[in-house]
Image (cartoon, helix red, strand yellow):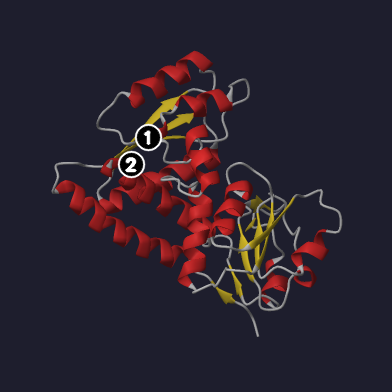
Amino acid sequence: MAAQRIDGKALAEQVLAECRTGVDALAARGIRPGLAVVLVGDNPASRAYVRNKVRACGTVGVHSEVVELPATASQAEVLEVVRRLNGDRSIHGILVQLPLPSGLDEAAILAEVMAAKDVDGFHALNRGDLLGGHTRFPPCTPAGMMRMLDSIGAKLSGKDAVVVGRSNTVGKPMGLLLLGRDATVTLCTSKTLDLASHTRRADVLVVAVGRAGIVTGDMVKPGAIVLDVGINRTADGKLVGDIDFGSVEQVAGYVTPVPGGVGPMTVAMLVVNTIEAAGG
Protein backbone atom coordinates (compact mmCIF):
# COMPACT_ATOMS: atom_id res chain seq x y z
CA MET A 1 0.00 0.00 0.00
CA ALA A 2 1.33 3.43 -0.94
CA ALA A 3 2.27 5.88 1.78
CA GLN A 4 -0.11 8.57 2.89
CA ARG A 5 0.99 11.95 1.60
CA ILE A 6 1.25 14.82 4.06
CA ASP A 7 -0.35 17.76 2.28
CA GLY A 8 1.82 20.71 3.23
CA LYS A 9 -0.27 23.16 1.26
CA ALA A 10 -3.48 22.26 3.08
CA LEU A 11 -1.78 22.28 6.46
CA ALA A 12 -0.18 25.66 5.73
CA GLU A 13 -3.62 27.08 4.94
CA GLN A 14 -4.81 25.79 8.30
CA VAL A 15 -1.85 27.39 10.10
CA LEU A 16 -2.45 30.70 8.33
CA ALA A 17 -6.11 30.58 9.34
CA GLU A 18 -4.94 30.29 12.95
CA CYS A 19 -2.62 33.25 12.32
CA ARG A 20 -5.60 35.47 11.51
CA THR A 21 -6.79 35.03 15.09
CA GLY A 22 -3.38 36.20 16.33
CA VAL A 23 -3.43 39.21 14.00
CA ASP A 24 -6.92 40.18 15.22
CA ALA A 25 -5.77 39.94 18.85
CA LEU A 26 -2.83 42.23 18.13
CA ALA A 27 -5.08 44.65 16.24
CA ALA A 28 -7.15 45.02 19.41
CA ARG A 29 -3.94 46.27 21.07
CA GLY A 30 -3.24 48.67 18.20
CA ILE A 31 -0.48 46.52 16.71
CA ARG A 32 -0.16 45.40 13.11
CA PRO A 33 2.62 42.84 12.61
CA GLY A 34 5.19 43.87 10.03
CA LEU A 35 7.71 41.78 8.09
CA ALA A 36 10.56 43.16 5.99
CA VAL A 37 12.43 41.02 3.48
CA VAL A 38 15.85 42.10 2.23
CA LEU A 39 16.40 40.80 -1.29
CA VAL A 40 19.85 41.26 -2.78
CA GLY A 41 20.33 40.46 -6.46
CA ASP A 42 17.98 38.98 -9.02
CA ASN A 43 17.99 35.25 -8.29
CA PRO A 44 14.74 33.91 -9.86
CA ALA A 45 14.24 31.26 -7.16
CA SER A 46 14.72 33.85 -4.42
CA ARG A 47 12.21 36.14 -6.08
CA ALA A 48 9.68 33.32 -6.20
CA TYR A 49 10.21 32.54 -2.51
CA VAL A 50 9.80 36.20 -1.59
CA ARG A 51 6.55 36.46 -3.58
CA ASN A 52 5.17 33.49 -1.67
CA LYS A 53 6.10 35.05 1.66
CA VAL A 54 4.54 38.41 0.77
CA ARG A 55 1.39 36.65 -0.45
CA ALA A 56 1.09 34.65 2.78
CA CYS A 57 1.45 37.81 4.86
CA GLY A 58 -1.26 39.51 2.85
CA THR A 59 -3.75 36.70 3.39
CA VAL A 60 -3.68 37.16 7.17
CA GLY A 61 -3.26 40.93 7.44
CA VAL A 62 0.45 41.09 8.21
CA HIS A 63 2.16 44.12 6.70
CA SER A 64 5.10 43.21 4.48
CA GLU A 65 7.66 45.12 2.50
CA VAL A 66 10.54 44.04 0.28
CA VAL A 67 13.76 46.04 0.23
CA GLU A 68 15.55 45.25 -3.02
CA LEU A 69 19.25 45.82 -3.59
CA PRO A 70 21.29 45.09 -6.72
CA ALA A 71 23.70 42.15 -6.83
CA THR A 72 26.49 44.74 -6.82
CA ALA A 73 25.45 46.07 -3.39
CA SER A 74 28.34 46.32 -0.95
CA GLN A 75 28.51 44.77 2.49
CA ALA A 76 28.14 48.23 4.00
CA GLU A 77 25.00 48.95 1.96
CA VAL A 78 23.29 45.72 3.03
CA LEU A 79 24.22 46.30 6.67
CA GLU A 80 22.85 49.85 6.47
CA VAL A 81 19.46 48.49 5.33
CA VAL A 82 19.38 45.92 8.13
CA ARG A 83 20.25 48.56 10.73
CA ARG A 84 17.49 50.84 9.44
CA LEU A 85 14.95 48.02 9.72
CA ASN A 86 16.21 47.19 13.21
CA GLY A 87 15.18 50.70 14.25
CA ASP A 88 11.84 50.73 12.39
CA ARG A 89 9.09 50.24 14.99
CA SER A 90 6.55 49.20 12.33
CA ILE A 91 8.74 46.22 11.41
CA HIS A 92 8.68 43.29 13.85
CA GLY A 93 10.41 40.67 11.72
CA ILE A 94 13.39 40.91 9.38
CA LEU A 95 14.33 38.24 6.87
CA VAL A 96 17.46 38.38 4.73
CA GLN A 97 16.69 36.20 1.71
CA LEU A 98 19.40 33.60 1.09
CA PRO A 99 21.58 32.87 -0.76
CA LEU A 100 23.34 36.22 -0.95
CA PRO A 101 25.51 37.13 -3.96
CA SER A 102 29.15 36.11 -3.75
CA GLY A 103 31.39 38.63 -2.04
CA LEU A 104 28.99 39.35 0.81
CA ASP A 105 29.66 38.06 4.31
CA GLU A 106 26.45 36.15 4.99
CA ALA A 107 27.26 35.40 8.63
CA ALA A 108 28.01 39.04 9.44
CA ILE A 109 24.82 40.25 7.76
CA LEU A 110 22.62 37.72 9.55
CA ALA A 111 24.28 38.61 12.86
CA GLU A 112 23.31 42.25 12.32
CA VAL A 113 19.58 41.42 12.48
CA MET A 114 18.54 42.08 16.07
CA ALA A 115 17.55 38.88 17.88
CA ALA A 116 14.06 40.17 18.70
CA LYS A 117 13.31 40.58 14.98
CA ASP A 118 15.12 37.47 13.78
CA VAL A 119 12.05 35.55 12.59
CA ASP A 120 14.24 33.14 10.61
CA GLY A 121 15.94 31.98 13.82
CA PHE A 122 19.47 32.54 12.50
CA HIS A 123 20.84 34.93 15.14
CA ALA A 124 23.41 33.43 17.50
CA LEU A 125 21.21 34.18 20.52
CA ASN A 126 18.22 32.40 19.00
CA ARG A 127 20.39 29.47 17.98
CA GLY A 128 21.73 29.28 21.50
CA ASP A 129 18.19 29.32 22.88
CA LEU A 130 17.28 26.51 20.50
CA LEU A 131 20.13 24.46 21.92
CA GLY A 132 18.62 25.05 25.35
CA GLY A 133 15.21 23.99 24.08
CA HIS A 134 13.27 27.24 24.47
CA THR A 135 13.70 29.50 21.45
CA ARG A 136 10.94 31.93 20.44
CA PHE A 137 11.92 31.72 16.80
CA PRO A 138 12.79 28.20 15.65
CA PRO A 139 14.04 28.17 12.03
CA CYS A 140 10.97 28.07 9.82
CA THR A 141 11.57 24.87 7.86
CA PRO A 142 12.25 22.65 10.90
CA ALA A 143 9.36 24.28 12.77
CA GLY A 144 7.10 23.54 9.81
CA MET A 145 8.16 19.90 9.77
CA MET A 146 7.40 19.56 13.47
CA ARG A 147 3.90 20.87 12.78
CA MET A 148 3.58 18.28 10.03
CA LEU A 149 4.56 15.53 12.44
CA ASP A 150 2.02 16.82 14.96
CA SER A 151 -0.67 16.90 12.27
CA ILE A 152 -0.44 13.13 11.79
CA GLY A 153 -0.19 12.42 15.51
CA ALA A 154 3.40 11.17 15.31
CA LYS A 155 4.69 9.80 18.62
CA LEU A 156 8.35 10.79 18.78
CA SER A 157 9.43 9.86 22.30
CA GLY A 158 11.97 7.05 22.14
CA LYS A 159 11.70 6.70 18.37
CA ASP A 160 14.68 6.62 16.01
CA ALA A 161 14.92 9.82 13.96
CA VAL A 162 17.55 10.19 11.24
CA VAL A 163 18.30 13.56 9.68
CA VAL A 164 20.32 13.51 6.46
CA GLY A 165 21.86 16.97 6.13
CA ARG A 166 23.80 19.15 8.56
CA SER A 167 22.97 22.70 7.49
CA ASN A 168 22.50 25.41 10.10
CA THR A 169 19.10 26.25 8.60
CA VAL A 170 17.55 22.78 8.47
CA GLY A 171 19.58 19.73 9.50
CA LYS A 172 21.07 20.83 12.80
CA PRO A 173 18.01 22.66 14.17
CA MET A 174 15.71 19.83 13.09
CA GLY A 175 17.87 17.43 15.06
CA LEU A 176 17.56 19.66 18.13
CA LEU A 177 13.78 19.95 17.81
CA LEU A 178 13.47 16.17 17.55
CA LEU A 179 15.73 15.76 20.57
CA GLY A 180 13.43 18.12 22.42
CA ARG A 181 10.62 15.60 21.84
CA ASP A 182 12.77 12.78 23.28
CA ALA A 183 13.54 11.14 19.95
CA THR A 184 16.84 9.30 19.51
CA VAL A 185 18.51 11.37 16.80
CA THR A 186 21.22 10.48 14.29
CA LEU A 187 22.61 13.28 12.12
CA CYS A 188 24.06 12.14 8.80
CA THR A 189 25.61 13.94 5.83
CA SER A 190 25.88 13.25 2.13
CA LYS A 191 29.30 11.76 2.90
CA THR A 192 28.14 9.35 5.61
CA LEU A 193 29.54 5.88 4.98
CA ASP A 194 26.82 3.29 4.38
CA LEU A 195 24.04 5.86 4.63
CA ALA A 196 21.41 3.17 4.11
CA SER A 197 22.38 1.41 7.35
CA HIS A 198 21.23 4.52 9.21
CA THR A 199 18.15 5.42 7.15
CA ARG A 200 16.74 1.87 7.27
CA ARG A 201 16.26 2.04 11.04
CA ALA A 202 14.61 5.46 11.06
CA ASP A 203 11.04 5.77 12.29
CA VAL A 204 11.27 9.39 11.17
CA LEU A 205 13.56 10.24 8.25
CA VAL A 206 14.33 13.82 7.25
CA VAL A 207 16.27 14.30 4.00
CA ALA A 208 17.79 17.74 3.38
CA VAL A 209 21.01 17.63 1.38
CA GLY A 210 19.98 19.06 -1.99
CA ARG A 211 20.76 15.96 -4.02
CA ALA A 212 17.96 14.40 -6.06
CA GLY A 213 17.33 10.71 -5.39
CA ILE A 214 19.88 10.31 -2.59
CA VAL A 215 17.36 8.17 -0.68
CA THR A 216 15.56 5.33 -2.47
CA GLY A 217 12.84 2.98 -1.36
CA ASP A 218 15.21 0.20 -0.35
CA MET A 219 16.82 2.61 2.13
CA VAL A 220 13.59 3.24 4.04
CA LYS A 221 12.09 1.34 6.96
CA PRO A 222 8.58 0.05 6.14
CA GLY A 223 6.00 2.39 7.63
CA ALA A 224 8.47 5.21 8.32
CA ILE A 225 7.60 8.90 8.18
CA VAL A 226 9.72 10.51 5.45
CA LEU A 227 10.04 14.31 5.22
CA ASP A 228 11.69 15.55 2.04
CA VAL A 229 13.20 19.04 2.21
CA GLY A 230 15.05 18.92 -1.12
CA ILE A 231 14.33 21.26 -4.02
CA ASN A 232 16.04 20.14 -7.23
CA ARG A 233 15.50 20.63 -10.96
CA THR A 234 15.91 17.69 -13.32
CA ALA A 235 17.37 18.04 -16.80
CA ASP A 236 13.86 18.38 -18.23
CA GLY A 237 12.98 21.12 -15.71
CA LYS A 238 10.87 19.00 -13.36
CA LEU A 239 10.92 19.96 -9.68
CA VAL A 240 11.87 17.03 -7.43
CA GLY A 241 13.02 16.48 -3.87
CA ASP A 242 15.93 14.55 -2.38
CA ILE A 243 14.14 11.20 -2.28
CA ASP A 244 13.22 8.92 -5.15
CA PHE A 245 9.55 9.58 -4.53
CA GLY A 246 8.11 6.70 -6.55
CA SER A 247 10.04 3.98 -4.73
CA VAL A 248 9.91 5.59 -1.28
CA GLU A 249 6.15 6.06 -1.48
CA GLN A 250 5.73 2.29 -1.83
CA VAL A 251 7.54 1.63 1.46
CA ALA A 252 6.92 4.56 3.82
CA GLY A 253 3.87 5.09 5.98
CA TYR A 254 3.82 8.85 5.42
CA VAL A 255 5.75 10.97 2.93
CA THR A 256 5.90 14.62 1.88
CA PRO A 257 5.68 15.43 -1.83
CA VAL A 258 7.76 17.99 -3.72
CA PRO A 259 6.30 20.45 -4.50
CA GLY A 260 3.44 20.89 -2.05
CA GLY A 261 5.08 19.39 1.03
CA VAL A 262 7.53 21.12 3.34
CA GLY A 263 7.82 24.33 1.28
CA PRO A 264 4.39 25.84 2.08
CA MET A 265 4.90 25.09 5.76
CA THR A 266 8.19 27.03 5.78
CA VAL A 267 6.31 30.11 4.59
CA ALA A 268 3.49 29.61 7.09
CA MET A 269 5.89 29.33 10.02
CA LEU A 270 7.58 32.58 8.97
CA VAL A 271 4.22 34.29 9.42
CA VAL A 272 3.78 32.55 12.79
CA ASN A 273 7.17 33.83 13.96
CA THR A 274 6.41 37.36 12.74
CA ILE A 275 3.19 37.46 14.75
CA GLU A 276 5.06 36.11 17.78
CA ALA A 277 7.66 38.88 17.38
CA ALA A 278 4.95 41.55 17.16
CA GLY A 279 3.39 40.28 20.36
CA GLY A 280 6.54 41.14 22.28
Kindly report the distance in space between the C-alpha atoms of the residues bearing marks 1 and 2. Answer: 7 Å
Give the quadrant of residue 185: bottom right
Q: Residues within 10 Å of mark 2 (few under 14, many from 20)?
A: many
Tell me which amino acid carries mark 1.
Ala
Q: Position of residue 130 (x, y in %)?
A: 51, 45
Residue at 26% over, 56% down: 20
Q: Are marks 1 and 2 in contact (CB under 8 Å)?
A: yes
Q: Position of residue 152 (x, y in %)?
A: 49, 73
Q: Is residue 17 above or below residue 34?
A: below
**101 sits to left or right of 119:** right
Earlier residue among tags 1 and 2: 1
SS type, badge 1:
helix
Tell me which amino acid carries mark 2.
Ala
Residue at 46% over, 24% down: 112
Q: Quarter of the image containing the C terminus?
A: top left
Q: Is residue 80 among what the camera can see?
A: yes
Residue marked by disc 1: 116
Q: Is residue 61 above or below residue 100?
A: below
Residue marked by disc 2: 277
Residue at 36% over, 44% down: 54
Observer-nearest of 154 and 237: 154
Observer-nearest of 24 and 13: 24
Q: Quarter of the image containing the N terminus?
A: bottom right
Q: Position of residue 228 (x, y in %)?
A: 62, 60
SS type, badge 2:
helix
